[in-house]
Amino acid sequence: RLRRYTDTTSNRQALRYMIRNTTLAPRTRAMAQLQLAQMHCYTRPTQIRNRCIIGGKARGVFRDFRMARFQFRQHALAGELPGVKKASW
């Protein structure tokens, strides 16, 4: 899914621009709208799910580290994540 999404991102953005551009002919805009509607659903950015790169979990994933909560905690406590330390106040 991710590979298909990255391959079609620029094409999808171009079609969306053509649909919104009011200076283009209505027929051109309609054709762009049809092409966008016929694209596979995996090319939509909302269909891409962030997954943990270690365990493959789909829920509880930190976007910045691409790790699930528990994996993040284990690696942070072991000092394997630079700039991350346990909070204390």
Image: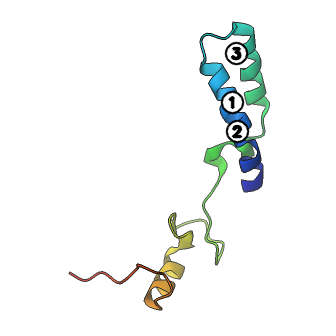
**The quadrant where residue 9 appears:** top right
Q: Position of residue 88 (x, y in %)?
A: 25, 83
Residue drawn 60% across the image and 20% down it: 20
**Figure check: 52 above or below 37:** below
Q: Amino acid at mark 3?
A: Arg
Mark carried by residue 87: none
Residue 11 % position (x, y): 73, 35
**Upstream in sequence: badge 3 or badge 1:** 1
At a point 74% along the width and 13% down the height, the residue shown is: 28
Tag of residue 29 = 3
> Is disc 3 in contact with disc 1, using a CB cutoff of under 8 Å?
no
Residue at 78 percent of width and 35 percent of height: 39
Question: x, y percentage for residue 27?
Answer: 75, 9
Please, which residue is most extreme toward the left here?
Answer: 89
Pointer 2 local density, CA inside 10 Å: few below 14, some 14–19, many at least 20: few
What is the quadrant of the N terminus in the image? bottom right
Whole-angstrom CA distance, mark 3 to mark 1, is: 11 Å
* Distance between mark 3 and mark 2 Cα atoms: 17 Å
Reading the image, the residue beneath label 2 is 10
Residue found at the far bottom of this picture: 78
- Residue 63 vs 79, above or below: the answer is above
Asked if labels 2 and 3 touch by Cβ distance under 8 angstroms, the answer is no
What coloring was used for the rendering?
rainbow
The x, y position of residue 58, in whole percent, is: 61, 65
Pointer 1 residue? 14
Is the residue under label 2 in contact with that under label 1 (CB below 8 Å)?
Answer: yes
Q: Assign a secondary structure to mark 1.
A: helix
Mark 3 or 2 closer to N-term? Answer: 2
What's the distance in space between the residues labelled 1 and 2, CA to CA?
Answer: 6 Å
Which residue type does callout 1 highlight? Ala
Element type at mark 3: helix
Which marked residue is nearer to the observer: mark 3 or mark 2? 2
